[in-house]
Image: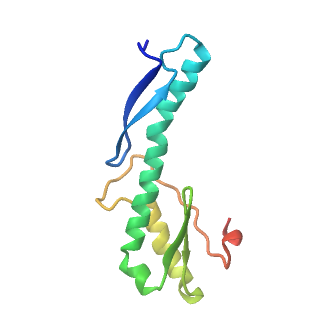
């Protein structure tokens, strides 16, 4: 049992980010409040890891010479999705490059134990790709 109602829980994501997140109610008497606080403490590194993956993919895409040659660039991020824009005639080639980047996003070559499955599409509008 935690001794104070406000506990600081240090977390590390799969990347290099550390955070000391204040999780309220870990030490309170009410069981349901402790359960909520424990869920927050567990979820924090998971959400942070997801953010690490998307950030790494954006950095890798931004530095990708092949995408630059194909005249494609990231225009928007929505949660775990990246939206690219470029000429239609290069879309199929860019799709293959983007899919590879998203499945292997880490610049330092880190390999995950579980493969990232990517669902990538070519569409004329963002709404058409969802």
Q: Which quadrant of the view contains residue 101?
A: bottom left
Percent from the top left, x then y, of residue 93?
Answer: 50, 81
Near-viewer residue (10 or 111):
10
Q: Is residue 52 left or right of residue 25?
A: left
Name above or below for residue 13 compared with residue 73.
above
Residue 58, visible in the rendered structure: yes
Which quadrant: the C terminus? Answer: bottom right
Q: Is residue 51 left or right of residue 85?
A: left
Give the quarter of the image for residue 86. bottom right
Percent position of residue 129, x then y: 66, 69
Viewer-proximal residue, 60 or 98? 60
Q: Position of residue 5 (x, y in %)?
A: 47, 18
Q: Who's the residue at 37% across and 75% down the image?
A: 64
Q: Is residue 104 visible?
A: no
The residue lying at 62 percent from left, 75 percent from top is 122
Could you tell me which residue is drawn at 58 percent across and 67 percent down?
120
Residue 12 position, x and y percent, is 35, 39
């Amino acid at each position: 049992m935690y001794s104070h109602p406000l506990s600081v829980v240090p977390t590390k994501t799969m990347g290099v980010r550390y955070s000391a997140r204040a999780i309220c109610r870990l030490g309170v008497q009410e069981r349901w409040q402790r359960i909520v606080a424990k869920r927050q403490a567990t979820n924090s590194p998971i959400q942070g890891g997801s953010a690490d993956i998307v950030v790494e993919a954006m950095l890798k895409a931004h530095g990708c010479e092949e995408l630059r040659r194909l005249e494609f660039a990231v225009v928007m991020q929505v949660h775990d999705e990246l939206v690219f824009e470029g000429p239609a005639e290069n879309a199929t080639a860019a799709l293959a490059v983007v899919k590879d980047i998203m499945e292997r996003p880490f610049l330092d070559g880190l390999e995950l134990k579980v493969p990232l499955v990517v669902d990538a599409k070519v569409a004329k509008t963002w709404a058409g790709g969802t």
